[in-house]
Amino acid sequence: MRKIILIAYLVSFLQNIGVAQSILPANQPALIPFPAKWAPAPGINQLHSEKDINWIQDSSIVNPEGYRLQIRPEKVVVYYREPAGAFYAKQTLQQLKNTDGSLPCLDIEDAPRFPYRGMHLDVARHFFPVEFIKEYIDLLAMHKMNYFHWHLTEDQGWRIEIKKYPRLQEVSAWRKETLVGHYSDQPHQFDGQLYGGYYTQEEIREVVQYARERFVTIIPEIEMPGHAQALLAAYPELSCHGQPVEVATEWGVFENVLCPTEETFTFMENVLLEVMDLFPGPYIHIGGDECPKIQWKESAFCQELMKKEGLKDENELQSYFIRRIDRFLTEHGRKLVGWDEILEGGLSPNATVLSWRGMQGGIDAAQGGHDVIMAPTSHCYFDYYQSKHPNEPLAIGGYLPLEKVYAFEPVPETLSQEEAMHILGAQGNVWTEYIPTTEQVEYMAFPRALALAEVLWSPLSKRDFLSFQNRLAQYLPKLDIHYADHLFDIRYELDGAALLLSNRMGLPMWVQAGGQSPALYTQPIPILTDTRIQAWRAAADGEPIGRLLDLDFHTHAAFGKRVTWTTPPHPNYQLGGTQALTNGILGNKNRYGDGEWLGWWGSDVELEVDLQEPQSIQNLQLRFFQSQGQWIYLPREVELFYSDDGIQFQSVAREAMPSTAESVLSFGLTFPETKARYWKMVITRFGKIPDGAQGAGNEAWIFLDEWILAP
Ligand code: ACM
């Protein structure tokens, strides 16, 4: 599956608030976006109406989106160059306003760091009403974001009215049912409910106008040549095999793709003519990601076309496809945007690259002189889990907490100054396979979108996560949406066999260990036996607030002991570090991005543990995660070794892995009792994913959560 995380290539919002810590007392309203410069002036302004603001056009302001703001006891003055700057000044005033309508006196000089500050929304996997799209645009604009990437077509649904092709509305906009639960749950189950809908052209014009009034440009995305199964359900003659297909009812990457025939180009160009008529902005996104080439390989037409056009492989054929569409859009005065796969087989001359499988696509494109928007899975995929808490609602996978978004740097160090000018900015992606409701969109996008807004607006030198959190804690309750409130969650780590607790806000925490009475947490808690620890943060009156932390410790001979790895896990899946393997906490059965699971990709796993003194061991227990749809397979076999000196190891047990349909395999191995201090384990990887499976031909992943050694 796409973005499946696993694919191995795999903030000025508060901008106004960055300096707030030193300037605003704690009870000041939090502002969200952070001016480049601001200085306090004494006093308070009682702003009674917008008429009390003087708006002064000032062409000396360099950045067209920039503005200056002076708040004095007797007046408010806004200097702006372009209307967008005036609009952003207004958002800042709104954020500055106290509940009684007063404003703190200050001077602000503000402008964005990046010209592209965006959010994406997939309305195809799940469909959201026009009213919500407007609300989403409002939320973007309030936080000084200026692009909305509207992902309108997919395998699972076509959501834009195209008058020339009515079957897109009648057929492609509807799927007969939808997958229930996670793709990795087996067997797949479906809800049996017809699902779908689309935006009429009238509705789209209304949304475009609404966005324009808020200085938000919409980039429509019409996916080609892959992710087109819904289209093919209505017009099967545009595939290479011409066979009937259904609008997809489950998630993934599908082999039914557009065939690069003249008929297809005519069709897509006609679609794009209507799209361009609806969306006046400079950019048209044509997808280009995750296009399996199997049907092109099997098609005599494609093979003939490749010969005729001198294309050496199917990647070049995809590049030929994109180049033709690029030429068409360029002729019509528009710019093509595509996901970074459009680099494969040669990048089309006028293309802007949206780099999602990491930063490399963006780096290559910028070095080739192309404009780039960054949206790497590592920092910009807001469909990933945002908390390790076991009660998180079902998500696609991954783990992208707020602080990681806030730490995002869109400009890679490797670029020269000139190349770096091609990094227009970044966007957050909200894919909606596991996001069926508008409330859930809000929950997944906020506050991570606010962190990104601050990254994209504020100067790097003003970024300060502590300050951001403090501003956020005051600001979030004012946002009338279903945001994720994880600021107060308790975090844990193990230092040897001692449990350390903390929370971002430094609030008092209460702990209940085993059956004992609750006590205020003051120092690390030694874990001596199997035990359950619950912890919560407390309000001033001692009442629990926020989510409960609930940990079940399983102690064993290697518990709290230091593990070293010869083969490190993949950087995206080593969050818990080596200690995750011996911290006595088992990984979540439903997700591998929880910090307990470690993931290896394309290598065997080789680990050593030092038990500090010789211990008698006769049992090995391991847990492996399995989700073949996400490229995660059980390994082939496990071999265990022991040593007295940590140098010479001898094999003591070796066994092939049994198979299971479960998402977690608990693997146990008993062997003759052996006393030793040093232990080593080699886990042989599955290898390449077989044909016909998701990710065929790629290396499979191994996910392991705990290395249990027992007497
Ligand atoms: C993507 O996530 N397939 C762009």
Image: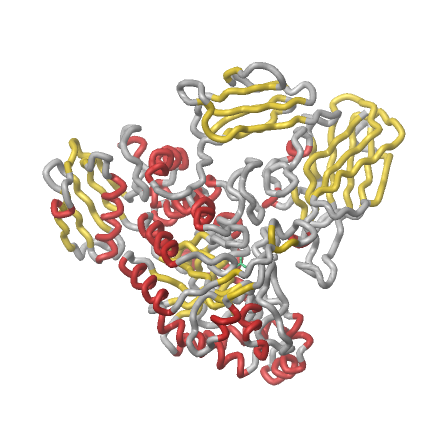
Quadrant where the N terminus is found in the figure: bottom right
Position of residue 265 relative to residue 486, above or below, is below
Residue 95's quadrant in the figure? Answer: top left
Residue 679's quadrant in the figure? Answer: top right
Residue displayed at 53% across by 28% down: 548
Left/right placement of residue 55 relative to residue 462 reads left
Q: Which percent across, then down, holds residue 149?
A: 42, 60
Left/right placement of residue 111 relative to residue 542 reads left
Left/right placement of residue 613 relative to residue 412 reads right
View extreme (right): residue: 672
Q: Can residue 418 be seen in this view?
A: no
Position of residue 121 relative to residue 347, above or below, is above
Position of residue 532 relative to residue 198, above or below, is above
Residue displayed at 37% across by 34% down: 473
Q: Which percent across, then down, holds residue 544?
A: 47, 24
Quadrant where the C terminus is found in the figure: top right
Q: Can residue 547 be seen in this view?
A: yes
Residue 462's quadrant in the figure? Answer: top left
Position of residue 679 relative to residue 401, above or below, is above
Q: Which percent across, then down, holds residue 306?
A: 62, 80
